Amino acid sequence: MQPDMNNGVALPHLQKLGYEFYNRTNVLTIAKALIGKIIVTHFDGQYTAGRIVETEAYNGIIDKASHAYGGRRTNRTEVMYQQAGLAYVYLCYGIHHLFNIVTNEQDTPHAVLVRAVAPLAGIPVMLERTGKKKADYTLTRGPGNVSKALGIVTGHTGQSLLGDVIYIATDNFPIKPREIVATPRIGVDYAGADALLPYRFILKGNPYVSGKK
DNA sequence: CTGACGATTCACT
DNA sequence: GTGAATCGTCAGC
């Protein structure tokens, strides 16, 4: 969890997660398993990476908080109905690009939102992308900041996470089950009772986790 | 075609 | 704590 020891050089000893990881039926299991994993972006000659410390699960057509609630199928959400292991990136509030991972089999629109990471590589690039001068904890805290720092934009929707542009990997960093805490999701009050479901997972005590202290 | 609004962030009081 | 920013998406007409 040391910040950027390598100034944007590819991290060693990473094992990319495969299709089997994403193509599972329980999106909560996947959202939880993603805590501690590493997200890497590598394009435009720039390499950035961070350890995932906060995720949210969106449980398909029965989840009032999901864009796919009730089976709603639009141009924007179409990718959620595709195969597992694709990126779903959409514009929120006209400003923020939010990065999600499509899971489960085709026609089952599950997704996991990555809400916070701890920077591991390419911090100078992240600073440039975000316009920040110092690498404080806000650099990659919150889903809008994560995408901005990693350079992810809506154009990356449909991008396969099995390739070398955007992918998730493990370095076998040990995470104890008790270090992962489940809480209600952020900013989904419109979802009624579903807003209370414990579908948000955080790495306990990590300073990059969003929300009030 | 139109209007309302969002899985947010940041500046300011 | 409050409100602005900012625009693609979507439902409704």
Image: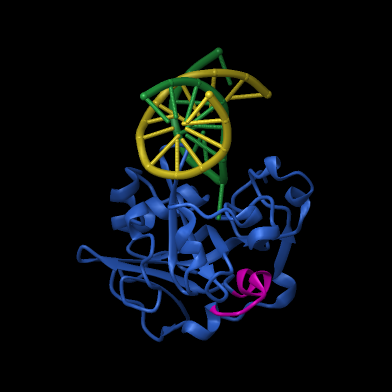
Chain colours: A blue, B green, C yellow
> Where's residue A22, x and y in %?
53, 77
Image quarter of residue A58: bottom right
Image quarter of residue A175: bottom right
Residue A32 in the figure: left or right of residue A87: right
> Where's residue C13, x and y in %?
53, 24
Residue A27 magenta: yes
In the image, the segment drawn in magenta is A23-33
* Residue drawn at point x = 58 percent, y = 53 percent: A72
Q: Is residue A93 visible to us here?
A: yes
Image quarter of residue A176: bottom right
* Residue drawn at point x = 61 percent, y = 69 percent: A31
Residue that sits furthest to the left in the current view: A45
The answer to which of A67 and A144 lies nearer the viewer is A67
> Where's residue C9, x and y in %?
45, 44
Residue A34 magenta: no
The answer to which of A53 and A89 lies nearer the viewer is A89
> Where's residue A95, x and y in %?
41, 39
Tell me: residue A23, above or below residue B6: below
* Residue drawn at point x = 48 percent, y = 52 percent: A74
The answer to which of A143 and A159 lies nearer the viewer is A159
Q: Is residue A205 visible to us here?
A: no
Q: Main secondary structure of the magenta part?
A: helix
